[in-house]
Image (cartoon, rainbow, N blue to C red):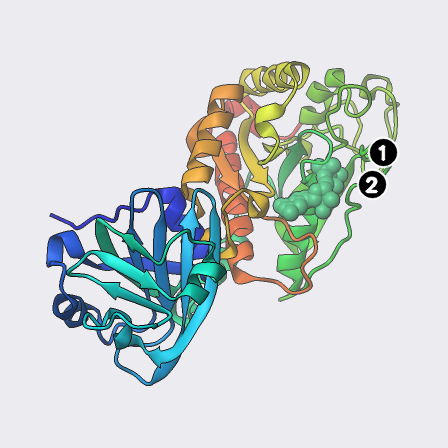
Amino acid sequence: MAVATRLTWRQEKKLQNYFGEKQFSLLYKASVHGFSTNSLLKICSEQGPTLTVVYSEDQIVGAYMQKNYGEGNYLITVFVFQEITITECKVGPFKLLMLFDEDYYGNREVSIHLNKKRMHFSINTVKKLGLSQRYISFQDCEVFRCEDLLDKRRMNGITELKESLLCAIRNYLPYGGLVNKIRILLLGPVGAGKSSFVNSVKSIFRGHVTNQALVGSNPTGTSEKNRTYFIKDAKDNNTLPFILCDSMGLSEKEGLDMDDIPYILEGLFPDRYQCNSLKLMPKGIGNHTGCPLLEDRVHCVAFVFNANSVEQLSNQMVKRIKRIRRELIKSDVVHVVLLTHVDTLDLITKADLIDIYKCVPVKLKLEAVHRKLGFALSDIFVVSNYTSEWELEPVIDVLILSALKEMLWAADDFLENLPLENTGRCA
Ligand SMILES: Nc1nc2c(ncn2[C@@H]2O[C@H](COP(=O)(O)OP(=O)(O)O)[C@@H](O)[C@H]2O)c(=O)[nH]1
Ligand SMILES: [Mg+2]
C-alpha cells in the first residue's frame, strides 16, 4: 500500500508554495519505516533538497534543507506551521546529519530525536519561532523530496505543447470548408476579461505582449462599442482562421441589450458600430444586407467570467446568462465558458498552471459554475490573461491556446450539425 502523508491538501499546498513552488514526494514516514535515524538516512540520503516535518498535537514543525544530507555545513530553515501561519528562522550552518544527532542534548539550535519522538530547540530558536517551550513531543515524522515544479525538463515539455497547439490552430480548416473563418463571440459581465483575452490571443500570435483591445475602458467599465478582431500570425503575416468578436459587457444598467443577442448571432456585429438597438440598424452598414451569410454568423460563443467572482453573480445576471444560453441552444450555437483571472485564485501559483485542471480549487470552481449556470464541466476552460506581464510565458500560452483550440473544435460541431439547407450561401 502506498504510504500517505499526514499533511492535508491545503497544508501541503501552503508549504509547497512557501518553499518556492516545489513538488513534494514522500520518502520516509517514521510510523512506517521506523523511528530511527539510520532508517531515515538510508532512505533520504542523496535525494537533493528535502523537507522534514514532525507532527505534534497541535502544530507542524519542520526543517527545509537545500542540500543532500551528509554534504558540507549549511543553513537550515526551521519552521512552525500553525493553522494558516508559517513562522521560520535560519539555523546553522551545520552538517544536515547533525539535525538527527541522537546523543546530543546540548545547546544546538535545533535537533530531532527520532527514537524519543522529541524535537529540541535552543532558547534563541524558541524565541525566534514563538514557541512556548524548548521541546515538543511528536507522533510522526515525514521527509519529502522537494523538486522544482517548473524545472527545465518540464518547461521543455510545455514549450513543445505550445508549439503543437500553435501548429494545430494555424492549420485549422473549418468543417467542410463551409466558412473561411470561425467567428467567436465573447460574452460576459463587464470586467470579466473579454478584451484581455483578445489581447492575450493577439500577443501569442504576434510573439510579444500587445494591448490593442482597450481593457477596463470607461468609468462604468463597459466598452462602448462592439469590436471585431482579425488575428495576424507573425510567422507568415496571414490572418488566422478565426475572428474574435469582443462584445460590450453584460451589465445591470448599461451594456449589451438582451434583445440584440439574436441579431448578433445572425451576424449583425458591425465593428465599432454604436447604436441603441441592432433591430433599428439601417441596412448597408457593415455586413447588414438583411440576408445573413453563414460566414458572418457567430459559430461559437465563449461566456467569459472572472473565476474569483463568478459565484457572486447577481440573480439578475444569472437570469440573463441562462436566457442567452436558452437562445443558443434553440439555434444550435455551441458555447463554452472561459474562466479568467485563474492566476489570482487562492493558493494557485504559476507552476500550478501546468496541470491546472487537477488543482482542487479549480475543480471546485468548475463545479460551482456548473451548479450556478448549468454549463457542462467539459465546456469550462480556465485561462490567465496577459495583463501586467512584459514577456510571453509558455505556461500561460498553453492555457489560452488550449481554450482557443476547443472553441474551434466546438465551432466545427456547430457547422457539422447545420441542416443542409443552411450550409449554402443565401441566394
Ligand atoms: N490577474 C488577472 N487580471 C485580469 C485577467 N483578465 C482580465 N484581467 C483584468 O481585469 C480587468 C478587466 O478586464 P477587461 O479585459 O477590460 O474585461 P472586459 O470588460 O470583460 O473586457 C482589467 O483590469 C484586466 O487587467 C486575468 O486573467 N488575470
Ligand atoms: Mg472589454
Percent x, y of residue 350: 52, 56
The residue located at (87%, 35%) in the rendering is 219
Q: In the rendered structure, are the residues bearing label 1 and label 2 in contact, judged by CB atoms less than 8 Å apart?
A: yes
Residue 248 in sight here: yes
Give the structural element (helix, strand or loop) at label 2. loop
Q: Mark 1 points at which residue?
A: 224
Query: Mark 1 or mark 2, which has the lower sequence index?
Result: 2
Give percent across and percent down for residue 196: 69, 46
Q: What residue type is labelled 1?
A: Glu
Q: Nearer the viewer, residue 342 or 40?
A: 40
Q: Is mark 1 on a helix, strand or loop?
A: loop
Q: Mark 2 points at which residue?
A: 217
Figure quadrant of residue 152: bottom left
- Give residue 354's mark: none
Q: How far apart are marks 1 and 2 (CA)?
A: 8 Å
Quarter, ligand 2: top right
Q: Does the residue labelled 2 lie within 8 Å of ligand 2?
A: yes
Q: Relative to residue 79, is residue 360 depicted above or below? A: above
Residue 172 in view, yes or no: no
Instruction: Look at 48% across and 26% down and name the residue there.
Output: 368
Q: Is residue 89 left or right of residue 234?
A: left
> Residue 119 at what x, y percent from top left?
28, 60
Q: Residue at x 81, y 17 (%)?
A: 279
Q: Pointer 2: residues within 10 angstroms few (<14), some, or many (20+)?
A: some
The residue drawn where x is 46% and y is 39% is: 362
The amino acid type found where label 2 is placed reads Ser
As drawn, is 367 to the left or to the right of 326? Answer: left
Number of dots carrying numbers: 2
Q: Nearer the viewer, residue 385 or 59?
A: 59
